[in-house]
Image: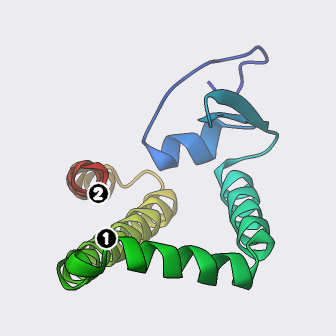
């Protein structure tokens, strides 16, 4: 596929495939298509920059006022909401950490696959491990989304 000079439209969660093939990412964001001319790393860097800009645009005074209003409206439920939020944030942080770990393991395996060259037995072993990790990553992503 990498030798094909035309356009290929694909949807994939396989980051190895995306890294190897993709030269442009079109993401569906805020009910519209956004084009990123670059690979997946470029897309992630751009998203991180956007997030940083959005965080800088929030004024501390508006956050304080909003927080105070919300606290006044929900005074009776504050403790239970704090507990739920803490648990939810803890669960999300745990899942995100596990996703990062699995993604790093997949990258290591991909590097090892490139280094293995034509050692078919080693390539097969690495491929099976990568397949297992991709299934685990899919499972983590499902849990994270839900």
Along the line of sight, the residue nearer the viewer: 124 or 110:
110
Q: Is residue 131 left or right of residue 21?
A: left
Q: Residues within 10 Å of mark 1 (few under 14, many from 20)?
A: some
Q: Quadrant of residue 7?
A: top right
Percent x, y of residue 124: 26, 50
Along the line of sight, the residue nearer the viewer: 119 or 114:
114
Secondary structure beneath dot 1 equals: helix
Q: Is residue 12 above or below residue 14?
A: above
Q: Which residue is mark 1?
A: 92
Percent x, y of residue 70: 44, 72
- Name the residue at the top extreme: 6
Percent x, y of residue 13: 42, 41
What residue is rendered at 61% in x and 43% in y? 20
In the image, which disc is placed on residue 124?
none
CB atoms of marks 1 and 2 within 8 Å = yes
Q: Which residue is mark 2?
A: 144
| Count of number-bearing discs | 2
Percent x, y of residue 14: 43, 43
Q: Is residue 80 above or below residue 49?
A: below
Q: Earlier in the sequence, mark 1 or mark 2?
A: 1
């Amino acid at each position: 596929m990498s030798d094909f000079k035309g356009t290929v439209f694909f949807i994939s969660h396989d980051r190895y495939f995306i890294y190897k093939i993709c030269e442009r990412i079109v993401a569906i964001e805020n009910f519209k298509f956004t084009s990123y001319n670059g690979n997946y790393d470029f897309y992630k860097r751009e998203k991180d920059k956007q997030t940083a800009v959005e965080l800088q645009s929030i004024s501390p005074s508006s956050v304080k006022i909003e927080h105070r209003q919300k606290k006044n409206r929900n005074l009776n439920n504050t403790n239970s909401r704090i507990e739920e939020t803490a648990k939810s944030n803890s669960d999300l942080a745990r899942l995100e950490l596990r996703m990062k770990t699995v993604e790093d393991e997949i990258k290591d395996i991909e590097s090892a696959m490139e280094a293995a060259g034509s050692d078919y037995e080693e390539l097969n072993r690495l491929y099976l491990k990568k397949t297992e990790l991709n299934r685990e990553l899919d499972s983590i992503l499902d849990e994270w989304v839900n």
